[in-house]
Image (cartoon, rainbow, N blue to C red):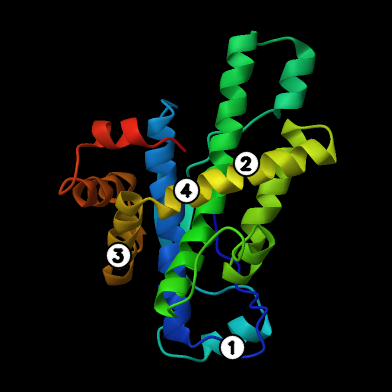
Amino acid sequence: MKRNYQIDEPIPLKHRQLVQQTAFHEAGHAAAIYLCNRQKNLPPVYFQITFGGLCASTPETDRLKKLPHSNWVATVEGGNLIHSLPLSVIESSGYFSDHESHAYQLAYEADIINLLAGPLAEAKYVAERDNETFNPRLVNVEALRYYGGTSDLEKVDEYLEALIATQDKRSKKLNELFLAAFRFVEDPSHWYAINRLAHHILENDNEIIGCEEIIEVIDNALLPSLTYDRLSANFRC
């Protein structure tokens, strides 16, 4: 889950703004992986946040490489529930039971929501920073490309093509999962946890933030309000 750095704006972002947006982007991915998967009773999956340099050569990255601290790039590694055969292959083979195939579909959908949560978190941060409105009509699926979401959307398309045969049904499912991801990011307790994790990312001095450390930051952010079980009873991704 890596934020793309092909900026489609006429005026390049200031480097500090890009760093902050990236932190919220990756915090959105990480919070969704942990909280949404847990709320759906899906198996835990290992993930971490790593830091490295800008490798791709684009006009924007070439400009950023000349700036102080230009090698700051955060990326969520791991966190995907689906690693092997697509659902279409498994269903056609008859290898899994109906219950197992349903669980496999839930895993696909969870991965898609977690992918969409990254650029949505970045979009919400930018909207609040610029005192703009944040809603699913203004920030739709295609708009996520302006918030580092191009690579995330490409992965989402791959998942949907493996999950659903027809384009109309894929579009309907994408809209459904996009709204689920939007509700996740908009939830006040989740947004507070994303904020806390984003600031933890920005203050980090290590090359890796491990899974346990990420979970601790999120859990500590949720503690001042209700317990996790009471929160999950009132919200479902």
Tell me the amino acid under the disc marked 3. Asn
Q: Quadrant of residue 201?
A: bottom left
Q: Position of residue 166 (x, y in %)?
A: 84, 35
Q: Which residue is mark 1?
A: 12
**Mark closer to the chain start, 4 or 3:** 4
Q: Is residue 203 visible?
A: yes
Q: Secondary structure at mark 1?
A: loop
Residue sitting nearer the eye, 192 or 64:
192
Mark 4 and mark 2: span between their CA atoms? 11 Å
Q: Secondary structure at mark 2?
A: helix
Q: Quadrant of residue 17?
A: bottom left
Q: Residue at x 59, y 48 (%)?
A: 178
Q: Secondary structure at mark 3?
A: loop
Q: Secondary structure at mark 4?
A: helix
Q: Which residue is mark 2?
A: 176
Residue sitting nearer the eye, 216 or 117:
117
Mark 3 and mark 1: span between their CA atoms? 28 Å
Residue sitting nearer the eye, 21 or 84:
21
**Mark closer to the chain start, 1 or 4:** 1
User: Marks 4 and 3: which is nearer the front?
Assistant: 4
User: Marks 2 and 3: which is nearer the front?
Assistant: 2
Q: Which residue is mark 3?
A: 206
Marking on residue 4: none
Mark 2 and mark 3: span between their CA atoms? 37 Å
**Mark closer to the chain start, 2 or 3:** 2
Vertical arrangement, residue 170 with respect to residue 25, above or below: above
Image marks 4 and 3: residues in contact by CB distance under 8 Å:
no
Disc 2 packing (10 Å; few <14; some 14–19; many ≥20): some
Tell me the amino acid under the disc marked 1. Pro
Q: Residue at x 32, y 62 (%)?
A: 195
Marking on residue 183: 4
